Image: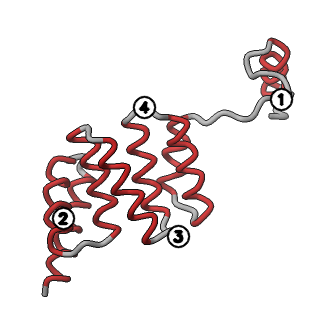
Amino acid sequence: MENADGEKLFEKGLQALARNDTLAALAYFERAVHVEDRPLYSSHLAFCIAKERGQYQLAVTLCEKAIAKEPRSSVHRLNLGRIYVIAKKKSDAIRTFREGLQHEKNPQIIEELDRLGTRKPPVIPFLKRENIINKYLGIALHRIGLR
């Protein structure tokens, strides 16, 4: 019976997230975790904690524990990446999203990476990205469609 209650609360939390109501989702996920401590519930709870309460370190810890329990799940890395985005740690977010894609092709992760606008590596790797040669060579290659 408790398992079904946890799942119902989790589903209501997902519906609230779909409406961008993270405060309601936070309440549902907290209750779901209280009923049954599952990594999926904790991962979503972590995202809501970061978004609503700004407790980034707690959120990162919850997500990392979920990843440790279910290392093949891209959903946990999606939530961790979103936490990094909220915390303004773009490079950590991109790294985390890419790790998630290595485990499974998650369209939400691809959407997040597109939103962040990931950059390609410099054309000449031994020069800095800001080097004028790298900059203009990259622009030129992009305009002619080779990059």
The numbered dot on residue 72 is 3
Left or right placement of residue 129 versus residue 113 in this view: right
Query: Residue 123: which quarter of the image?
Result: top right
Per the model, the C-alpha gap separating discs 1 and 4 is: 27 Å
Looking at the rendered structure, the kind of residue marked 3 is Arg
| Circle nearer the viewer, 1 or 4 | 4
Left or right placement of residue 34 versus residue 93 in this view: left
Which residue bears the numbered disc 1? 123
Identity of the residue drawn at 78% across and 29% down: 122
| Circle nearer the viewer, 4 or 2 | 4
Upstream in the sequence, badge 3 or badge 4? Answer: 3
Looking at the rendered structure, the kind of residue marked 4 is Lys
Which residue bears the numbered disc 2? 12
Which residue bears the numbered disc 4? 88
Upstream in the sequence, badge 2 or badge 3? Answer: 2
Nearer-the-camera pick, 50 or 110: 50
Per the model, the C-alpha gap separating discs 2 and 3 is: 25 Å
